[in-house]
Amino acid sequence: MSAQILDGKATAEKIREEIKDDVSRFVAQTGVQPALAVVLVGDNPASQVYVRNKETACVKAGMKSLMFRLNAETTSDALCDLIEKLNKDDSVHGILVQLPLPKGIDEKRILDLIDPQKDVDAFHPENVGLLSQGRPRFLPCTPYGIQQLLIRYNIETKGKRVVVIGRSDIVGKPMGLLLLQKGLGGDATVTVCHSRTDNLADVVKEADIVVAAIGKAQFVTADMIKPGAVVVDVGMNRIQKEIVDENGERKTVSKLVGDVDFDAVKEVASWITPVPGGVGPLTVTMLLLNTLNAARRLVADAQ
Ligand code: GUN
């Protein structure tokens, strides 16, 4: 039997409508328009697409988007000056520095400098610490989106064995922390696997829920999945694929695939996210929510 689709795109659209209504109510009550400052350094093509998506989503939700595009030769000092300026600017509620930064820029120094109250990515050590203690200020966008997707499809996490594949600071580690929290969308028994995990396939096979965030195209195969498991695919990998076109000619095309071998795994899983249209749209959505919440807190603190 084929798995049912966890439709991230539709879920993201629904949440964005809710956020848009909340933004319009907030603006009517306070006269303040939530504003997100996005900083892009260099010309990484994928980052340029992500940043454009964030800008468009912000505007559609009724928020202000401030874009700062800096060239790849920008120094750490110059970037720090910009962050300090944005930290002090009361009309800016969220600050996001798109990663990866070009080589030569001290990423930790930059992320640590962002005012934790405006850190809508939840990458600042203070916000990571608050999350790990179970009293989060901001939730990191991709794990937050995945948790919302599971909640909105009534997929129980309480008491379930979840295996996260990948230990990145952006997805793997915070995903584990979120699923460990007490309450709805949490209370799971979490294992975080990575490239050095012994018998990784055997560990994944025990999971009721698998979150694949390892950055390797089609890494998770059907034999690794327990029948009936829920599979969430965070991967965004470009592969070259040979096809035969309508004239019968062979040609190589570029295709976006996840970390999961979707066609095979969907025959074993009960629920699965597609790529694209799964986790991706939810990440931007939760960024919007974090920005609105940052504005709510900053405006309340100023009163
Ligand atoms: N690059 C890839 N994902 C992210 C993200 O969630 N936030 C930022 N700032 N950069 C990224």
Image: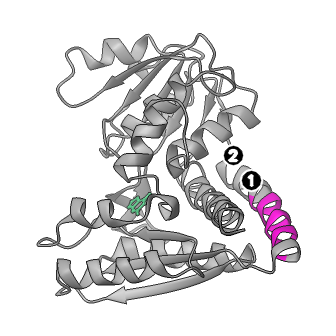
Does mark 1 have its CB less than 8 Å from ligand 1? Answer: no
- 17 sits left or right of 272 in the view: right
Name the residue carrying label 1: 10
* Quadrant of the rendering where the N terminus is positioned: top right
Q: Is residue 274 magenta?
A: no
Secondary structure state at the residue bearing disc 2? loop
Q: Magenta stretch: give its range.
A: 16-27
Q: Within 10 angstroms of label 1, few (less than 14), some, or many (20 or more) residues?
A: some
Q: Nearer the viewer, residue 157 or 6?
A: 157
Quick check: 92 above or below 299?
Answer: below
Q: Which mark is residue 61?
A: none
Secondary structure state at the residue bearing disc 1? helix
Kind of residue at disc 2: Asp
Rendered-image quarter of ligand 1: bottom left
Whole-Å distance between the Cαs marked 2 and 1? 6 Å
Measuring 31% from the left and 42% from the top, which residue is drawn there?
168
* Quadrant of the rendering where the C terminus is positioned: bottom right
Q: Nearer the viewer, residue 39 or 236?
A: 39
Q: Position of residue 73 (x, y in %)?
A: 16, 87
Q: Which mark is residue 7?
A: 2
Measuring 35% from the left and 25% from the top, which residue is drawn there?
192
